């Protein structure tokens, strides 16, 4: 693929599906995010049900950790960019959202992240409705989420990305460069487009853990 393609607003490429090996179309859409720079949205869907979505940062980024203390309603508006290689943690709630081979990228805000967590917790609650202890834990976390969304509880939202393609955008955010040891502990969950082979390659780090709790 010619690098000049990345200057276009949008284009398509054809690749082989990593699951069924049929030809599928990959869509590329360029955009600019204020305070963050140029990005490329990438998506593909195959008739076999395989799907892929990611947000590629077009500028060089270092492996980073972003930490934001969410303590009022204004903090809920902080923008969150989560690529397929990004991990989101909320330590006060024991929540880890780790990337896997089927992870989606998205751009939202802190409130949007918490709403995604709520959806998972509500689903988990239905799955463990006959387990009194786990159901109670799920309900406690939902109550904590409500308090955060009402500005009554403080939490820390952490975003880590060994590829440097995720971030929290806020004047209050604390930024740290990840060490080599920290990077090695993170999953990437990446599905990589090889421009030389014109095909998708699966990263070996495909351990999917949408939610982990204490």
Image (tube, rainbow, N blue to C red):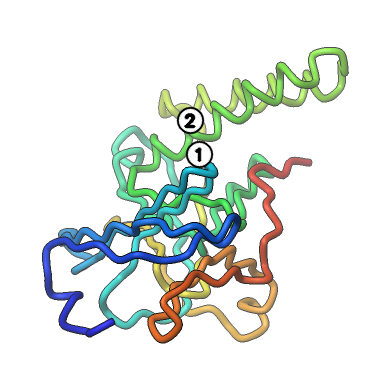
Q: Crowding near pointer 1: few (<14 within 10 Å), some, many (20+)? A: some
Mark 2 secondary-structure assignment: helix
The image position of residue 16, as x and y in percent, is 47, 64
136 shown above or below 90: above
Percent x, y of residue 207: 71, 58
Quadrant containing the N terminus is bottom left
Check the image and report above or below for 3 versus 102: below
Tag 1 residue = 154
Q: Estimate the x, y position of residue 191 in percent, counting from the top left.
A: 52, 66
Residue 5 in picture, x, y percent from top left = 18, 76
> Could you give the CA–CA distance between mark 2 and mark 1, rounded to whole angstroms?
6 Å
Taking depth in this image into account, of 208 and 173 the one nearest to the observer is 208
Residue sitting at 16 percent across and 82 percent down? 4
Q: Earlier in the sequence, mark 2 or mark 1?
A: 2
Q: Looking at the image, which residue is at 50% across and 39% down?
A: 154
Residue projecting furthest to the front: 22
Q: In this view of the protein, which residue sits in the foreground, 190 or 173?
A: 190
Q: Secondary structure at mark 1?
A: loop
Which of the two discs, 2 and 1, sits closer to the camera? 2
Marks counted in the figure total 2
Q: Quadrant of residue 132?
A: top right
In the drawing, does residue 104 fall left or right of residue 204?
left
Q: Residue 186 occupies which quadrant of the picture?
A: bottom right
Are the two marked residues, 2 and 1, in contact with CB atoms closer than 8 angstroms? yes
Q: Which mark is residue 148?
A: 2
**Direction from residue 59 to residue 93 in the image, left or right:** right
What residue do we see at 64% from left, 49% from top? 96
């Amino acid at each position: 693929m010619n690098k000049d393609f990345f200057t276009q607003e949008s284009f398509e490429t054809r690749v082989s599906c990593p699951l069924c090996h049929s030809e599928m179309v990959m869509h590329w859409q360029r955009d600019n995010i204020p305070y963050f720079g140029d990005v490329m949205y990438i998506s593909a869907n195959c008739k076999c049900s395989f799907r892929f979505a990611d947000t590629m940062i077009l500028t060089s980024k270092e492996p980073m950790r972003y930490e934001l203390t969410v303590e009022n309603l204004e903090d809920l508006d902080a923008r969150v960019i989560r690529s397929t290689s990004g991990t989101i943690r909320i330590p006060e709630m024991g929540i880890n959202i780790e990337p896997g081979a089927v992870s989606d990228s998205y751009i939202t805000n802190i409130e949007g992240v918490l709403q995604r967590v709520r959806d998972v917790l509500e689903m988990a609650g239905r799955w463990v409705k006959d387990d009194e202890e786990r159901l109670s834990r799920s309900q406690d976390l939902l109550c904590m989420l409500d308090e955060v969304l009402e500005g009554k509880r403080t939490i820390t939202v952490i975003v880590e990305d060994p590829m440097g393609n995720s971030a929290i955008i806020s004047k209050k955010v604390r930024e740290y460069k990840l060490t080599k040891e920290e990077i090695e502990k993170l999953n990437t969950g990446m599905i990589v487009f090889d421009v030389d082979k014109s095909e998708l390659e699966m990263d070996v780090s495909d351990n999917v853990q949408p939610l982990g709790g204490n």
